[in-house]
Amino acid sequence: MEEFKILSELAEERDGKGPQRADLDKCVHCGLCLNACPTYRELGLEMDSPRGRIYQMNQIAEGAPINDSYIRHIDLCLGCRACETACPSGVPYGRLIEAAREEILPRRKLSMKAARYQRWFFDKLLPSRPALQVAGAVLYFYQKSGLQKLARLTGAFKLLGSNLAKLEVLTPRAEIPFFYSKIGKTFPALGEKRFRVAFVAGCIANVTFARLNEATVRVLQRNGCEVVIPPAQGCCGALHLHTGMAEHAKALARNNVDAFVPEEFDAIVTNAAGCGSTLKEYGHLLAADYDYAEPAQRFSEKVQDVTEFLASVELNDQMGSLETIVTYQDSCHLAHGQRIKDAPRKILQSIPGLDYRELPQADICCGSAGIYNVVENQMSMEILRHKMELVKGTEAEIIATANPGCMLQLEAGVRMFGKDQRVLHVVQVLDEAYQNYMMALVRKKKLANATARRR
Ligand code: SF4
Ligand code: SF4
C-alpha cells in the first residue's frame, strides 16, 4: 500500500500529461490487436505490439522513469491505429500514443542541428504560406532543372550520406501553379446547386498536391456543390499532434475554428484522411479551452472526408468508362481513425469499365504515417516492400488511396519495388471518369456537326 502511494505521488508529478489512467485501464491485455499491428508483424516483439506499448505506458504512469528503451518502442509505433479498430474493449490507442509522445517530447535528446531543423519544420514552414511557397519554388527548380534527375542518376546523395539518399526518394513533386491562388475563392455548383461546402486545402498539399485539390473541387462541383475555400484557413496541426506538440496543434486548431463558420456549410470537406482525422478531433483537443470548446465541437461535427461526403449523396453518374484495373489501399486515418472503409470502395466500384481488385491486407499501414517514413525510414521501407508485393498480386494499373501522405509513400513504393503503376487519390480516379464523359460528349457533338455539314 505504502509503495502504491509513493508511485501515485510520482504519477501526479506528470502534471496531467501523458496517457490517462481511464484510457489505460480499458486494456484487458487480451492480445486481439497484435496481428493488426504492422510493427509487431515485422519484428514479432511484444514490446513493439500495442499491448506491449500500453504495458510500458502503464509503468510510466505508475512512476517508472522515461528511458531510451521506452522512447524507442513508442517511436517505432506508426500511430496507424489499426489496433484501435481490432480492439474489442474500445481502447483509445490514438489518444494514448499522442499523449505518450507529448510526455516524451521535453525529454528527447536531440542534437542542436536536429532541434533547429525540427523547429524550422514545425514552427516556421508548416504554418506559413510564404515559407511553403518559397520552399515549393526551390523544390520545383530542383525537379524541373534536371538537377533531381542528375542527382538520382549519379547517386550524388549517397556521397552525402546514405540517409539522405533514402529520403530523397520520398521527395514530393512541386506542382506549379500552386493551389494558393484558389484560396479565398468560391466555385459554383455545376448544374443544380444541392449543397454548399467548405474545402480544407491543407498546408503542404497546396504546393505538392495542387492538382489533387483542383480535382477534388471539380468533383464536388459536378456533384452539385458550391465550393467555398475560406481564406484564413491554415495547417490543421495533425503532424504537430502526432509528434507530441499538442500546444502547437491547439493554436493551429483555434485558427481553423475561427476561419470556418460551420453553420454556413452542409459540410467541411477534406481530401486528406490524416488531416480529417485531426479536424474531427478538434472538439476533444480544445475541450478544456473555455472560449473554443463549443465552437471547436461544432466545427468537428461538420467535417467529412471527401469520400464519406460523396458516398452519402446521390453520386452524379455521368461518368465515362475507365477500362483499367484498380486496387485500393486504405489510409489508416480513414479506415482506423475515422472508421471509413466502404465509402472509397463504393465510389471506385461505381465507375463504369473499372475492374476493381481488393488488395489483401489493404487496412495494414503502408508505412507512411505522417513523417514516420522520414524518421523511421528502415522500418517504413520494410512495410512498404511487403505492401508492394501484395499490390503486384492484384495486377492493378492504378493504386488508389485517400490521403496525400499515403500517395507519396506508394509512389516511392512504385519507384523502388513497383511496375509503373499510377498512384491516385480516389477523387482523381472519379475525376478522370467525369472528364471521359465530357470528352465523349464533345466528340459526339463534333461528329454530329460534321455529319450535318456533309448533308
Ligand atoms: S498504432 Fe499501429 S503501429 Fe502503433 S501499436 Fe497500434 S497497430 Fe501497432
Ligand atoms: S489494446 Fe485492446 S485488443 Fe489490444 S490487448 Fe488491450 S484490450 Fe486487447
Image (tube, helix red, strand yellow):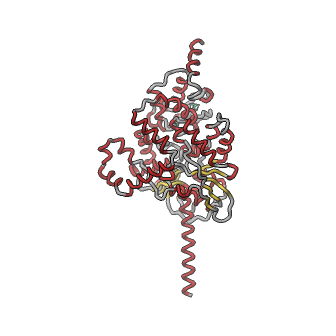
Relative height, residue 389 to residue 9 (above, below): below
Does residue 37 lie above or below 436 as drawn? above
Answer with the quadrant where ligand 2 appears in the image: top right
Quarter where residue 7 is shown:
top right
**Residue drawn at point x = 42 percent, y = 47 percent:** 170
Q: Position of residue 245 (x, y in %)?
A: 53, 36
Farthest-out residue, bottom: 455
Residue 327 seen in this snapshot: no
Residue closer to the observer: 416 or 75: 75
Q: Position of residue 202 (x, y in %)?
A: 54, 49
Relative image position of residue 394 (x, y in whole percent):
47, 53
Where in the figure is residue 127, as x and y percent of width and height? 52, 45
The extreme right residue here reads 263
Would residue 169 be visible to someone looking at this image? Answer: yes
Q: Residue at x 53, y 32 (%)?
A: 102
For the N terminus, the image quarter is top right
To which quarter of the image does residue 299 belong? top right
Numbered label tally: 0
At a point 39% along the width and 44% down the height, the residue shown is: 167
Residue in the foreground of this view, choosing between 156 and 254: 254
